[in-house]
Image (tube, helix red, strand yellow):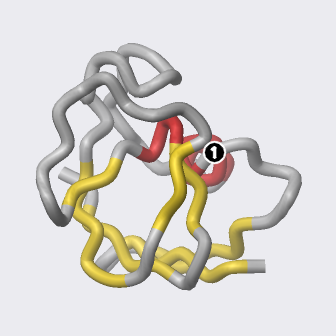
Amino acid sequence: MVKVVVKDVLSLEFGPEQRTLLDALEAQKQQVNYQCREGYCGACRCKLLSGSVSYINEPLAFVRKGEILPCCSIPITDIEIELP
């Protein structure tokens, strides 16, 4: 299991029962804006403060350095993120 820290909000474990980081955040009742779940729109964009993720679908939305799309990513190391 990998540890996911949402800056100043919560800490959770990401395990095989979650398909994406967005699923894990929603399971913890975190409000995350999104329009899709495939990396098309970029509405869920958040800051990756530390760690790394892997994309299950290569995002079509523009992602700047230091940002991730939780709708189509999974953490591969412990991560810290900041939600907008």
- Residue that appears at 32% across and 52% down: 68
- Identify residue type, mark 1: Thr
Q: Which residue is mark 1?
A: 20
**Looking at the picture, does residue 27 appear above or below residue 71?**
below
Residue closer to the observer: 3 or 27: 3
Residue at the farthest front position: 58
Percent coordinates x, y for residue 56 in the rendering: 61, 40
Quarter of the figure with residue 48: bottom left
When the figure is inspected, residue 81 is found, relative to residue 56, above or below; the finding is below
Quadrant position of the N terminus in the picture: bottom right
Name which residue lies at 31% across and 77% down. 7
Percent across and percent down for residue 61 are: 25, 26
Depicted 47 relative to depicted 11: above or below: above
| 23 horizontally vs 79: left or right | right
On the rendered structure, is 52 left or right of 49? right
* The quarter of the displayed image where residue 32 is located: top left
Name the secondary structure under disc 1.
loop
User: At 32% from the left edge and 36% from the top edge, which residue is drawn?
Assistant: 44
